[in-house]
Amino acid sequence: MSGENAIQIVDSIFEGKKKLMDVKSHTIHFGKIQTPSLNGEGWGEVIDEVVVSIYKNPHSYTGEDVVEISCHGSKFIIQKIMELCQQQGAKSAKPGEFTQRAFLNGKLDLSQAESVADIIAAENKVQHEMAFNQMRGGYSAIIEGLRNELIEFAALIELELDFSEEDVAFADREKFNLLIQKIKSTVTNLIQSFELGNVLKNGIPVAIVGEPNVGKSTLLNVLLNEEKAIVSDIAGTTRDFIEDTLIIDGVQFRFIDTAGIRETKDTLEAIGIERSYQKMKSAKIVLYLADIQKEHKEIIEDFKLMAINKNQKFIILLNKFDKVSSCNAIDIEEAIETLTHQKTIVISAAENKNIDKLQAELLKIVQNEKMNFDGIIVTNARHINALKDTLIHLNQIEIGMNQHISGDFLSIDIRMALQSLGEITGAVELDRDILGTIFGKFCIGK
């Protein structure tokens, strides 16, 4: 329970050694929850023996007086205690109301408050790390740092307007231009991180592609450790894509087994092959599977026919290396990696060999991508819209400075950029409907 009368309300139904109003903050007290007597003297029915934790304002999650009642897990007991609290004046919390109060009382900024919901919803290590880093304020510090630098120059330009008749320049335009370039670079980097943040949040799509009968379905089954796809010696068994998720060392991947790529007159298989190309185009990582028994020059020629997207990461997997000698396998691996400039790994999906090397390479790709953004990755669509608006206004400032427009027009664009940045952390006043939408996505408990 959080609010001005939280401690007083619990005091009215709690019997312990001391009145809760008289105890220190951050203390725990044992006692009984009881119904008040009808005449106002003494106690009625005992509901439960409980432990009560007291957090007095402003040193609490919400910044208000907070009381936590730890009781036994009976639904009857929980319901009865809630009824007693409501009879004494408490009301049920709305979704996100505790975190909304924390935001309104200055305990969290808006981006930190939103990350609380992401922490609760996190299903793997990476999702938790991204949300927790945001809640700790690293992202907020970057945004506020940019705002403060802009505010400093905005103040100097506003000062120039007060002395417009004297034609005095307080803001060094050259320094301001360098600042705009720096802020644009940071904002652009944050916007670009959203694509990575989105796939990390929802699972990194990995397409398994290659000719028919090279072991794509076998590889999927080995990765997932279950018979997800039908395995057969007959070429063209997989006629549509099969998709499932796997968490490797805390990172969620979405593996997609596609139909074998070849020329065919079979209508259904042709549709499956077309879908394979579509899935390959939308994947973040593409695993190109080839039979190591094939001539390596032919493997390279087949790989070159793939439509490589510069934003995608390719790994060439040479399957069935148990069918050739170890020395020969290593030579082919080195030759193909040298000639294609793509990471190449020899594997045996049927015998589950070198699958650990593949998993390590997948994790390495993710780690390298994260390092490109210094660990600050945007995952919130509202933030991206605000950053894109900021970039538009920064471009307008840059154009205005190049055209030597007057300070009064320049200050308008600066204010608009500050407004957009402030919307991310809640540094500017937001419409209550917007706040309601943001906190309405939370669970009742927060």
Image (cartoon, helix red, strand yellow):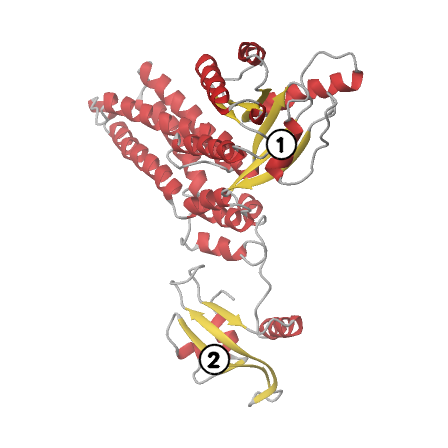
Query: Are there few (<14), some (14-19), or many (20+) residues within 10 Å of tag 2?
Result: some
The disc at residue 350 is 1
| Residue at mark 2 | 30
Whether residue 106 can be seen here: yes
Whether residue 430 can be seen here: no
**Location of residue 425 by image quarter:** top left
Among the two numbered marks 1 and 2 on one chain, the one whose residue lies closer to the N terminus: 2
Q: Nearer the viewer, residue 159 or 301?
A: 301
Disc number lying in front (1 or 2): 1
**Location of residue 54 by image quarter:** bottom left
**SS at circle 2:** strand
Q: Nearer the viewer, residue 17 or 75?
A: 75
Apparent side of residue 276 relative to residue 31 in the rendered image (left or right): right
Amino acid type assigned to the residue bearing label 2 in the image: Phe
**SS at circle 1:** loop
Depicted 330 relative to depicted 131: above or below: above
The percent coordinates of residue 92 (x first, y second) are: 60, 63
Depicted 86 relative to depicted 149: above or below: below
Residue drawn at (39%, 48%), measured in percent from left and top?
136
Residue drawn at (69%, 31%), measured in percent from left and top?
242
Apparent side of residue 134 relative to residue 359 in the rendered image (left or right): left
Residue drawn at (42%, 60%), measured in percent from left and top?
63
The disc at residue 140 is none
The percent coordinates of residue 281 (x first, y second) are: 59, 21
The percent coordinates of residue 91 (x first, y second) are: 59, 65
Apparent side of residue 293 relative to residue 112 in the rendered image (left or right): right
Q: Nearer the viewer, residue 67 or 233?
A: 233
The percent coordinates of residue 65 (x first, y second) are: 44, 67
Amino acid type assigned to the residue bearing label 1 in the image: Ala
**Location of residue 283 by image quarter:** top right
Query: Are there few (<14), some (14-19), or many (20+) residues within 10 Å of tag 1?
Result: some
Gap between marks 1 and 2, in whole Å? Answer: 61 Å
